[in-house]
Amino acid sequence: MLWKWVVIMSGWTHLDEHGQARMVDVTEKASSQRVASASGQILMKSATLTAIENCDSKKGDILAVARVAGIQAAKRTDMLIPLCHSLGLDCVEVRFTLMPPDRLRIDSTVRTTGRTGVEMEALVAVSTSALTVYDMCKAIDRDMTIEQIRLESKSGGRSGDFLRES
């Protein structure tokens, strides 16, 4: 009985009346345009950032590979996050901003028309892109730090819009 009270009072949609994990039923929700954007950063040595900028790596164009990895991961979010719905994504964008002397910013935007949002897909795109950069640069810089992965904005759906304040 305590779980029932916790679920009702908490508003947690991924727990049933017994406190068990469940996939949210979106059958009755109307389809709408959904957009979410996320960001993250990698702190690294300035020489590592310079190597990325100049494509001076034995592994090739690091940002091109990381972009494809982010897009691919967004498309497979349901395989990584257990209670996420499978979604047909209309668009996945991954962008990089070099922030000398020692930071790389990663931004993603994901769009779909559907019954559930794409926040997790945007976050997974950023996370996987960052991990790919780390993987490709770890031979020259194991001190890299992936940080501040966060949702920046989302629109569409019953819960309304969200825009992170600076």
Image: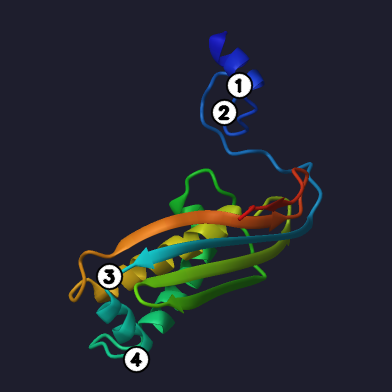
> Which residue is labeled 3 in the image?
135
The Cα–Cα distance between marks 4 and 1, rounded to whole angstroms, is 52 Å
For label 3, the SS is: helix
> Which residue is labeled 1 in the image?
7
Outermost residue toward the left in this view:
139
How busy is the neighbourhood of tag 4: few (under 14 within 10 Å), some, or many (20 plus)?
few
Give me the residue at 56% from left, 68% from top: 108
Give me the residue at 78% from left, 44% from top: 158
> Which residue is labeled 2 in the image?
15
**Colour scheme of the picture:** rainbow
Asked whether the residues under the numbered discs 1 and 2 touch, taking CB atoms below 8 Å apart as contact, a structural biologist would say: yes
Earlier sequence position, callout 1 versus callout 2:
1
The Cα–Cα distance between marks 4 and 3, rounded to whole angstroms, is 18 Å
Earlier sequence position, callout 4 versus callout 3:
4
Nearer to me, 68 or 28: 68
Of badges 4 and 2, nearer the viewer stands 4
